[in-house]
Image (cartoon, rainbow, N blue to C red):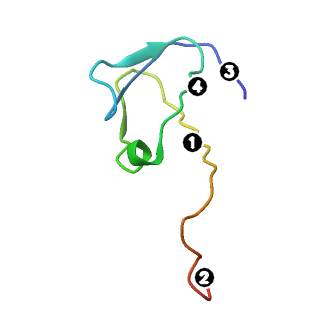
Amino acid sequence: MLSLPGNWQAQTSLETQPLQGDKSLDAQSGCDQLSVLQVTNKGEQPLWLRLDSSGLSKQRPCAGK
């Protein structure tokens, strides 16, 4: 992951206080939290969000999809 210099600040629906830093942040959440995740940029610079997910499906995909 490329880390560019600069301060960032974001508010998520999972935290009561804004998150902030000058480097990238790695966090882990369960599927129940990810289903309601909202992220809002509270800083003055652009905010880049990368979401990686992995796991096994509980149901097979529908035919033709």
Query: Hey, which residue is sitting farthest right in the picture?
Result: 1
Real-space Cα separation, disc 1 to disc 4, in angstroms? 10 Å
In this rendering, position of residue 5 left or right of residue 33? right
What is the C-alpha distance between the residues marked 1 and 3? Answer: 15 Å
Residue 5 is left or right of residue 40, and the answer is right
Q: What secondary structure is found at the residue carrying circle 4?
A: loop
Q: Secondary structure at mark 1?
A: loop
Q: Residue furthest front?
A: 58
> Quick one: 12 or 22, which is closer to the camera?
12
Mark 3 → mark 2, Cα distance in angstroms: 36 Å
Residue 51's disc is: 1
- Image marks 1 and 3: residues in contact by CB distance under 8 Å: no
Q: What is the crowding at mark 2: few (fewer than 14 residues within 10 Å), some, or many (at least 20)?
A: few
| Secondary structure beneath label 2 | loop
4 and 3 marks in contact (CB < 8 Å): no
Mark 4 → mark 3, Cα distance in angstroms: 12 Å
Q: Is residue 18 above or below residue 60?
A: above
Q: Residue at x 53, y 32 (%)?
A: 28
Q: Quadrant of residue 18?
A: top left
| Residue at the disc numbered 4 | 26
- The residue where tag 3 is placed is 3
> Disc 1 or 4, which lies upstream in sequence?
4
